[in-house]
Amino acid sequence: MIKAIQRLDHYLESFTAFEKTAAGQGLPWLRQLRRNAFARFCEVGFPTAHDEDWRFTNVSAIAQTPFLLGGNNRARPLQLELEPYQVPGFACQLVFLNGRFAPELSSLGKLPVWLEVSSLADQIVRNPGVIEPHLGQYVDIRRDAFCALNTAFVEDGAYIHIRRSAAAEEPIYLLFVSTANDTPTMGHPRNLIWAEENSQVTVVEDYVSLGGGTAFTNAVTELVAGDHAVVSHYMVEREHVHSYSVSTLRIQQGRGANIASHSILTGGALVRNNVHPVLAGEGGECLINGLFIGNGRQHLDNYMLVEHRSPHCASRQFYNGILDGHAHGVFHGRIVVHKDAQKTDAKQTNRNLLLSDDAQIDTKPQLEIHADDVKCTHGATIGQIEEDALFYLRSRGIDELSARRLLLLAFASECLDRMKPGPARTHVEALINRNLLQMGDSAPDLAQDLSSSEVERNWSEIG
Amino acid sequence: MSLLEIKNLHVTVDHHEILKGIDLTVDRGEVHAVMGPNGSGKSTLAQVLARRETYQVTRGEVSYNGKDLLAMKAEEAACEGLFMAFQYPVEIPGISNAYLLRSALNAIRKYRGLEEMDAMDFLPMLREKLKLLDMDEKLMSRSVNESFSGGEKKRNEILQMAILEPKLAILDETDSGLDIDALKTVAQGVNATRNPERGIILVTHYQRLLNYIVPDRVHVLVDGRIMRSGGPELALELEEKGYSSMEAEARSTASV
Ligand SMILES: Nc1ncnc2c1ncn2[C@@H]1O[C@H](COP(=O)(O)OP(=O)(O)O)[C@@H](O)[C@H]1O
Ligand SMILES: [Mg+2]
């Protein structure tokens, strides 16, 4: 009954049509992967608030909308419309429309032999044997209905492969454009990043929208980092306010691998950002860094699942949230330390600024520790712009609005400072600055603020 | 026209009257010391003049440079040349000292219709002032007051003053917690900014600072009122006798 409400019938139609023509439809393993995933999705349907992992986020808006897979191809954007999204300093730029690679809009440049960048669909057709050992091997379709749904529709996205001991100096830029107009449109981009032993690469996934219609982007990235690989991954969600965005970054880390995941969420109506690293090899390190900035009625949900499976690994989670208007933020930080993962060092910090009385944050640490010799710390703060700091700046001649913005930038810079200098950081820094320049002016009346006891609880530890 | 004229100023915080009728006039070129026991309202006076909105003025008026100070916002007062050095300078992670200084200077210049100062002109000026206050240039790239020692914070306030070149400077216990060398450096910084156009109000609990910055007038603030005013000798008298007799006097006035 619930499933009928969720329009699973609509997904069945889409899936049946998709399966017939999808790239690699003749590959038994791929067909099986898709079918198993679709069966799993039908079995569980979209999550509800009864699901502990979805307590704070209601996805019924996604469940109840009939989305057209891949969108209307006649409404393809022109090169010109994508010009604002050109960023300097990158090795190549791949553009995806509703999850499908658009070669005519992409610039692959000339890449060295040790770096392979292409569409996943292209790999499925030309080199299925290379991706078979990885594709779908890491995300857990049983745990997450959205991953199941993505895997059912797995076909296109980015494929990045960097060879052993190679280091790509310039980052790789992936632009995901949702182009919905009158018809609600969905895309299920699937990315596979395979960094072999001792290699180094930086990848940026940037999610934007053209056209004003309702779009649903359900992305999955599997990042496989070999021993001692060093990978920086950026995810930028800046779609418009009629967008639903669910993304999952599943990181598989080898021995001594050093991974940084940076998530910047500024757009979307309903956003769920899953980051799930598994520290599978000894001595691995993972930085999970994020900034979410919400306004209006945006709902921005960050779900972290950090799994320590080997000894001597370190994970650091830092998420900062800035919420204005009626925005609702969620930070759910789950750390699982498996039995053999002795000497684990796991840290988690979530700091939030609420700029209006109606903004809301739910922050929830969840530690499951099955080893005995570990160090795990977590903390969360919820506060407002500090009146002390604001007055200090104003007393030096800086007007109130500028002072507020400066303090927001300072708060955001905690996240920026954790990114290595380079084109990727420069890109997100500019986005964040632009975004924050539009904020800070709807702050509650200060005098009123002070009379409540909230201010005294500024930055009180709540975790 | 005096630089600052405070008339019958009453100030309330949280329905609690803290300043109970202050009269004070400061002329250009003068240094006034405001002394008094802890909790007497010295910082309240300083913060009200710097236009902190959390303090409510219930009566009285303040004219600054011929304008109604109480009608100004904090940033306007600053742009009009009023500067307060905080008793407890605020730490602001994520904003560098250099950035704050240049933003402040340029905000004020813009208000006065002057061109913004670029880094090329700003840096030599900053270096010169840093030298005056014996401060390390490295502090400038650090966040505002973050992990500064007590002395560094106070010097940083004076550095800001030296760069912003105010018409009226109010220094709230800039001397407290400083060792004698730091005190001398700070006093030297203040003395260097003394000129016939500038008024200075030194808020202090102890007389020691006044050995290095000799005031024209000394006022003793007790329980929200100025109990006595006099020349520099009043500070010495206080040093000897303490505030207790005046506090007793204040209590008896209050009970009348
Ligand atoms: N923000 C405030 N809220 C409540 N009471 C305050 C506040 N600021 C000052 N006071 C009270 O006002 C009185 C004067 O304080 P203050 O001006 O800081 O004195 P001083 O600087 O002379 O030590 C004290 O009793 C203090 O407790
Ligand atoms: Mg004080």
Image (cartoon, coloured by chain):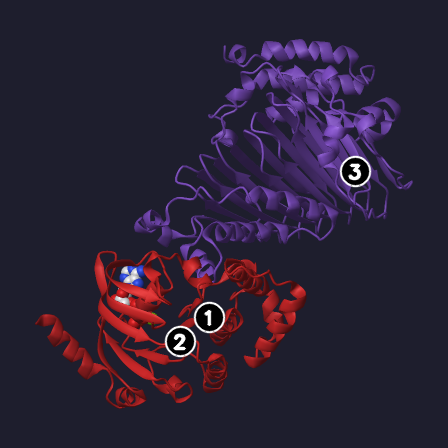
Chain colours: A purple, B red
On the rendered structure, is B226 left or right of A291? left
Which mark is on residue B199? Answer: 2
Is label 1 or label 3 in front? 1
Identified by mark 1, the residue type is: Pro
The residue located at (76%, 29%) in the rendering is A80
SS under mark 3: strand
The crowding category of the residue bearing disc 2, from other C-alpha atoms within 10 Å (few below 14, some 14 to 19, many at least 20), is many
Distance between the alpha carbons at the discs numbered 1 and 2: 9 Å
Which mark is on residue A194? Answer: 3
Distance between the alpha carbons at the discs numbered 2 and 3: 68 Å
SS under mark 2: strand
> Where is A129 relative to A304, above or below?
above
Asked if badges 2 and 3 are on one and the same chain, I answer: no
The chain ID associated with circle 2 is B
Identified by mark 3, the residue type is: Trp
Is the CB of the residue bearing disc 3 within 8 angstroms of ligand 1? no
Q: In the image shown, does A99 or A284 lie closer to the viewer? A: A99
The residue located at (52%, 21%) in the rendering is A61
Choose top left, top right, bottom left or bottom right for residue B32.
Answer: bottom left
The crowding category of the residue bearing disc 1, from other C-alpha atoms within 10 Å (few below 14, some 14 to 19, many at least 20), is many
The crowding category of the residue bearing disc 3, from other C-alpha atoms within 10 Å (few below 14, some 14 to 19, many at least 20), is many
The residue located at (47%, 44%) in the rendering is A441
